[in-house]
Amino acid sequence: MKISMVIPCYNEEGNVIPICNALKEMFAKDLPKYEYEIILIDNKSKDKTRERIRSLCENDSCIKAIFNIKNFGQFNSPFYGLLQSSGDCTIHFCADFQDPVEMIPIMVREWEKGHKVISMIKTSSKENKVMYFLRSIYYKLIKKMSTENQIEHFTGFGLYDKSFIEILRNLNDPIPFLRGLVAEYAPDHLEIKYEQQLRKAGRSSNNFFSLYDAAMLSFTSYTKGGLRIATFFGFTVSLISFLIAIVYLILKIMFWNDFIAGNIPILMGVFFFGGLQLFFIGLLGEYIISMNTRIMDRPLVIEEERINFKENKENN
């Protein structure tokens, strides 16, 4: 039986060789009866990551590589890597050692017991505490608003049986959100808790905009709450505004000479409703962007090169 390891890479020159060595040592020590393949999918790194990967592939045919022609983002590239795996199960794993290597044998033992999908859940993290707190708030909010039961503090680190990988292959989703898909199509998944580690080398490629993309993709893919809030809030504000206008009219009629409303209420109303409209137009735009991307049905990634794959597969 074979286990596939899918490792997304972007500017990981200091991590790819150590992580592959650590995985090979782990397989030799803890999982000697299994064959394995390590698939490194590089998202157009700007450092020497590809040089390191080529060296690894030359020395070990079990290490395979996919080089994208450009950076296709934090969701498409790892998902595409999962679809290229050929193992009886596939493990999605980060190159930076934040996902502990020692958790892999634990997942495999649970898979041997019959669990088809195993999700690794962060109970704590050695990352910035403020970021962890903000993520916690986000996960709880999206879980409350989602039409599906979302998984809190799940990054995609986990084990996926080949039967679930086949489900993913048949989805044909141009902007896949793995965390949501696991919640939607593997409701009986097993959750195992772990502490996320610090990066061994390099800097995280995550920034405000990438985290915002992740938040909006999950929000627009799995919630109707945003549009419904806009609808109800707009109706409520309109009703309140109408009632205030009636009160102003009555007061003006009753106290024509003494009641002076002035321009301040008008200006406040204009700025308030203008800002409100811009906010909800932007929210509606996020939904439209998500719909437009799916309608265009572009490929997940386009490969520039692949190494150590015995068969040339067509790009999805």
Image (cartoon, rainbow, N blue to C red):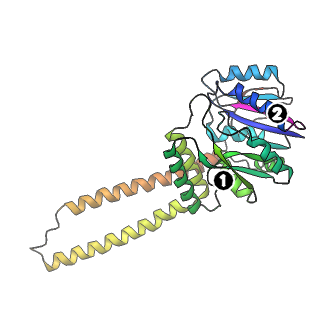
CB-based contact (under 8 Å), mark 1 and mark 2? no
| Residue 176 against residue 189 in the figure, above or below | above
Residue 37 is labelled as 2
Q: Which is nearer the eye, 114 or 186?
A: 114
Identify which residue is drawn at 9% across, 73% down. 258
Q: Mark 1: few, some, or many residues within 10 Å (few <14, many ≥20)?
A: many
Image point 77% across, 37% down: which residue?
Answer: 5
Specify whether residue 178 is painted magenta. no
Horizontal side, residue 95 vs residue 252: left or right? right
Q: Nearest the camera: 15 or 300? A: 15
Viewed as shown, does residue 138 lie left or right of 99? left
Image quadrant holding the C terminus, namely top right
Q: Quadrant of the N terminus?
A: top right
Magenta highlight on residue 38: yes
Instruction: Give the label on residue 180, or none.
Output: 1
Residue 45 location, x and y as percent? 62, 26
Kind of residue sitting beneath label 2: Glu
- Residue 223 x, y percent position in the rendering: 58, 59
How would you classify the magenta stretch by its main secondary structure?
strand
| 228 versus 25 height, above or below | below
The answer to which quarter of the image holds residue 306 is: top right
| Residue lying farthest to the front in this orientation | 29
Q: Which residues are magenta?
A: 31-42
Q: Do we see residue 85 in this rendering?
A: no
Residue at 37% in and 67% down:
237
Lower sequence index among marks 1 and 2: 2
* Picture residue at 47% right of the left edge, 65% below the top: 231
Question: Residue 16 location, x and y as percent?
Answer: 69, 27
